[in-house]
Amino acid sequence: MASLPQEPPQDTAKQSFWMPGNYVPTVHRTQRSYQACNDLVACFAERARVEKQYAQQLSQWSSKWKAVVDSRPLYGSLMTAWQSFFTSTERLSALHSSVSQSLVAEEGVRVKTWQRETFPKKLFCGFRESHDNGGSFSRAQKPWNKKLTKLEKARTVYHKCCQKEQNALDKEKQANDAENLSPEKKQKVTEAREVATVAKEKARERYEKILEDVTSYTPRYMEEMEVIFEQSQEEERKRISFLKQAFLSIHRHLDITNNESVKEVYNELHQTLMAINEQEDLKWWKNNHGPGMLTNWPKIQEWVPSVKKLKRKKRVQKGKEGRPVMIGGVKVRALYDYTGEEGDELSFKAGEEFLKVEEEDDQGWCRGVLSGGKEGFYPANYVELVE
């Protein structure tokens, strides 16, 4: 019911109406509407005092100067003309006094009466509408929250299994490269890697199954939430409609003159008030705090290995020691996206191919050259050899 504020950029995955607990702004809207009524009454009660004070000042000015003029040696039409200023001022004073009384006795009482009827309170629970809406939203969202919790747990387990498999793959690679390691130990390392792979696949299957359950439940969840939301919207529509009529009624009290310059001011005010559109207000709320908000629905989040970062000085020193350089380089393909955080690091997208020109160091970094000619470091576990 106030001017629509600009919404700051938000993370849609966290701020969306559909996510757990984010229906609260809609529930609290009842409290804000109630407070808006208090503010409206207080605002125009103060305006009524301004009108009353202005009426008194006009009357005082008229009485003072009427007495002065009556004592002056003027006569005829000149006296009549001068005295007409005071007559018109007394009439204007009476009009402003009437406006003052109307703003308090009529509009203030009208808004307060409507406020008591529209916002029934529930003992110890605030407003009945807020309590009912909050309970309905909570019940509708409870099974959805449980499913989301299960989904998050499954995602965490799956990503941990991915990490374990990657660790096992690294150990297997080291074992295969070690010439002095016995075949039996190499076999044990391979078996451990296979166990990790099986565990990862099982974790992914469970993750996908729970995600399928969440996805299949989503339409029902949306339907239940929208029913409750539309009930709240209807109550808010009635409030917007009433306050629009209250504003227009107050305007009729204030628009007291036919002077063209003043009429222009009130006409502009009238146009602004007439531009109140409950449908547009409801549409804005829906798009910013309701079902119209952008939402990142749950989906599989692929695991990306972590990068062991080196301090710049240590990396430069390592480079000076002179690791083996490959003549012509070896072609590799990026498995994941990577954005270099320092000036001597490469940035690339998954699937991009480039040359590896220096072997991996003991910190897991290689030196490579992109197709555009840029040379730099990149994490070795982010690429694979191109056959």
Image (cartoon, rainbow, N blue to C red):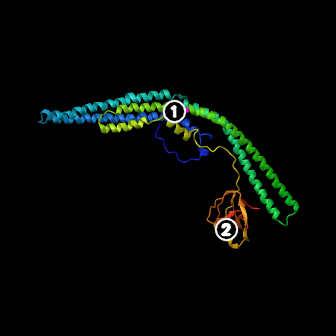
Identify which residue is drawn at 78% across, 57% down. Answer: 169
Nearest to viewer (mark 2 / mark 1): 1
Q: Amino acid at mark 2?
A: Arg
In depth, the one of 306 and 56 nearer the eye is: 306
- Position of 72 compared to 166: left or right? left
Q: Position of residue 136 (x, y in %)?
A: 61, 32
Q: Amino acid at mark 1?
A: Glu
From the image, give the main secondary structure of the stretch colored magenta: helix
Span colored in magenta: 232-237
Q: Quadrant of residue 211?
A: top right
Identify which residue is drawn at 47% across, 29% down. Answer: 115
Mark 2: secondary structure = helix
Q: Which residue is mark 1?
A: 236
Q: Which residue is mark 2?
A: 315
For label 1, the crowd category at 10 Å Cα-Cα, with few meaning under 14, some 14 to 19 and many 20 or more, is: many
Q: Position of residue 77 (x, y in %)?
A: 14, 33
Is 155 above or below relative to 184? above
Identify which residue is drawn at 71% across, 52% down. Answer: 303
Q: Are marks 2 and 1 in contact (CB under 8 Å)?
A: no
Q: Which mark is residue 224?
A: none
